[in-house]
Every structure is written in structure tokens, then in C-alpha cells.
Image (cartoon, rainbow, N blue to C red):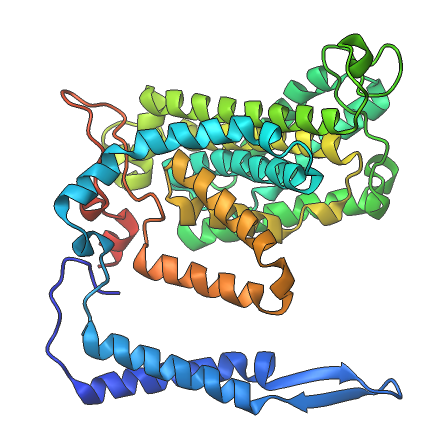
Amino acid sequence: MANESEPAKPLDLPAAVKEAAIAALVALGLFMLLIGIRTDQGPTGALVFTTRFGALAAIVAAVFVATLIRATLLRGAGISVARLLPASVSTAASALTGYAAAAFLVFALIVPIVFYGNRYLLDLAILIATYTMLGFGLNIVVGLAGLLDLGYVAFYAVGAYSYALIAHYLGLSFWICLPLAGILAAFAGLLLGFPVLRLRGDYLAIVTLGFGEIIRLILLNWQNFTGGPNGISAIPRPSFFGLPFNPSEHGFAATFGLAYSPTHRVVFLYYLILALALLTNWVTLRLRRLPIGRAWEALREDEVACRALGVNTTTTKLTAFAMGAMFGGFAGAFFATRQGFISPESFTFAESALVLAIVVLGGMGSQLGVAIAATVMLGGFELFREFDQYRMLVFGGAMVAIVIYRPRGLVATRTPSVSLRDHKDIPAAIVRDARTETAA
């Protein structure tokens, strides 16, 4: 992809037509079986094929026209949103980032008050907060340390099963099991970190992906301990300082003189995961300003330079894996106590892919970007639920567009860990991806 700062090339119509034709052929190959042919069950139970070549031709033609327009109008130049806006607007937008984060936090705090009577929206808010916390944890590994981790769901699973098994066999409360689940997940992060110390890029991604599948298969096949495919049920719920959320005279509602409502427990769970997510965010921001945080960012930019400067890359990588895994374990423990039931099917590769997409689309290294991406992706999925047949296609196209035209994520600016004089964010226009520079 052309750099945003490069000028447009002279118009070459044959080359533009050739590029559009190649894009149309690729679209034809991708959508031939997805859209052109549909399989249904006939009246006798046999498989019946239905062709939809008209819709296929329309999509291929749209790809051809869109690529041709892009090739003729842009002529190799990238699309820069900053160019379309005055400099004063771009400066004001950077200055308003802090206010946007504060507004986002205020809205998150009043969600249960505004939507108290809507159980569906409350559950959706809990889901968004859970994935936001997972995004914060993975952002340490991917966004700050630059280590591509495709098996992050393994730490999520370790935290969930640790809480469920400890509560089941030892009968400990949620508040005791929560830190234990985080510690065990951090230990799993160290186990993953040691074998991959010398790996980078695609090789690191493959190993972490395999680690996630190993954890899932262990949980699936160790039936005597984990329950196997049947999972673990009747997981204890958390209480409010010893007050259970039930209609008894010693429950939460009776103690505070309130009418009993099952929504009380849902609101409590929402504020619990929100507090955990905010704690994760605060710890991450503090760690960025410490020497270990600056070592993570240096490792992300250039590992060879880190070694030359005397930075211990072994401990830097291990601490990144351990810290990210610990926060994933906290989120897993919350998931187990909220659901009351867990099984290996809840911890597939799709969960890792979703969390990684949240981190990348939000802007690697940006905490606010992770929160915005989690809200947009999960809320958008629910918004387009009525268009179930096309929503994955729409979101796939939207993700491709963001990666092409906003390669550094929705929030592309970086806040420096240490500033000597005035505190100023680093604009996206001068941020360079070390991997892109190396490839060039």
C-alpha cells in the first residue's frame, strides 16, 4: 500500500483496468461458492443446489467499478483523513482525546442507571466490558511489547477453570479465587513465554496458536478433573460483602430495605467487571511509565537495538506474557462466575481472533482505542443481528477497509511514556511501524 505522504502517480488507464480486472477475478473466486451457489434440503431430504449468479455478477461488477475508480482517482496515493480536514480541526481532535475518554467513562458508569429496566442491554454492556478487559490485557503483549499472540484465549480459559475448580473442590469464595486465578494464568503465561523467547513474527503466532489449542484439548479430554465436554456447572456466584443476591431475609435487598429484583445481581456484576477493567487500564498506564513499560515499547520498535543497549529481552518478554495473561485470567474468573457454567466450547480460537481484532482495530498501544473498538464491534454485531445473513460480510468488509485506510487503528496517536517539557501526543502521520520499515 502506498504511503499517505506519497504524491499521486500519473494516470495509467491500462494499468488501472488491469488492477480492476484482477480484483474482480479475486472477488469471483471468493464469492463463487459463498454467494453464487446455495445448498438447501429438498422435500425428499436430498441436497438441492440453487444458483444466484445474478447477485454474484453484481458483486463482481461492484468490485471492478470500485477498484477502477480508486485506481483512476487516487492513482496510488493513500487516503488520509487528516488531509481532508483543516489543521485546526486535527489539532482540536487530538486535544479532545482526554475529554472523549472522560465522557466514555461517565457513560459507562451511568449505564445501569439509564438501562436498568432493559436486561438485554445490561447483559450486552457486561459483555463489552469483559472484552474490553481482555483487550487491555492483550494490548500489553501485542500493542506495547509487539509480540503477536494468537492463543490469548488459553489464559482466559485457565482463569475461568481455575476459579471454577478451586471454588468447586475447596469451597473458597470469589474474592479469594479471583487473585488465585490471575496468578495461575500468569504462570501459564510464563510457560508459554519460555519456549518462544527466540521466535518472532509468523513463527511466534503459530506457536501461540498451538498453545491455545493445547489448553483447549486438555480441558476437553481431562474428564475426571475438568468435566470434559460436559464442562463445570453450579459455579458459585459472588456476593456483596457476604450478602447474597436472593430473596431471603439475609439477602442484599432485605438488608438495604429494597424490593427484591434479579436485576440487582446483574448491576453488581456490571460494576464488578467495570472495576476490573478500570483497574487493568490504570495498572497498564502506570506500567508504561516504569522502566519495564519503556522496555516493552523499545522491544516492539526494534529487538536488536534493545539487545545492543543492554535491555534483557528475556525478562521483558516474560513479564509481558505474564502480565497480559494475569489480566486474561481475571476476566476468565469473572466469566465463570457470571455464566455459572463453563465448557471448552467457550474458549475456541474465534475468541482469540475477536480480542486481537479489537486491539488491532482500536490502535495497538491505545487504551481508549481498545474500549472504542470493543464497543463498536460487539455493539455493532447486536445492531445488525436482524441481518444475520449479511452482517459478517458487512463487518468483514468494514475491518478490511479500516486495515487499508487506517492501518494504525481507530486511535492512531501515541502518548509518549516520558515527556521532557510539554506533554504532547505523537500524531499518526509520523508514527512508523517497525515491521513496515524493515520490509521496505
Instruction: Give percent across and percent down for residue 427.
Output: 21, 41
The one nearer the camera, 162 or 240, is 240
| The C terminus sits in image quarter | bottom left
Q: How many marks?
A: 0
Position of 313 with respect to 243 (left or right) is: left
Left or right of 41 in this view: 21: left
Q: Is residue 420 visible?
A: yes
Q: Residue at x 68, y 23 (%)?
A: 268
Residue at image location 63% in from the left, 58% down from the top? 385
In the displayed structure, 327 sits above or below 93; it is above
Does residue 319 appear left or right of residue 211 in this picture?
left
Which residue is located at x 20 percent, y 60 percent? 3
Q: Where 71 falls versus 166 (above or below)?
A: below
Residue toward you, 267 or 197: 267
- The vertical placement of 15 against 164, above or below, is below
Picture coordinates of residue 306 (x, y %)? 27, 33
Above/below status of 401 relative to 138: below
User: In front here: 77 or 323?
Assistant: 77
Tell me where residue 45 appears, x and y as whole percent: 87, 84
Q: Quadrant of the N terminus?
A: bottom left
- Can residue 149 be seen here? The reply is no
Q: Is residue 328 left or right of residue 306?
A: right
Residue 413 is situated, as x and y percent measured from the top left of the image, at 27, 40
| Front position in the image: 337 or 440 | 337
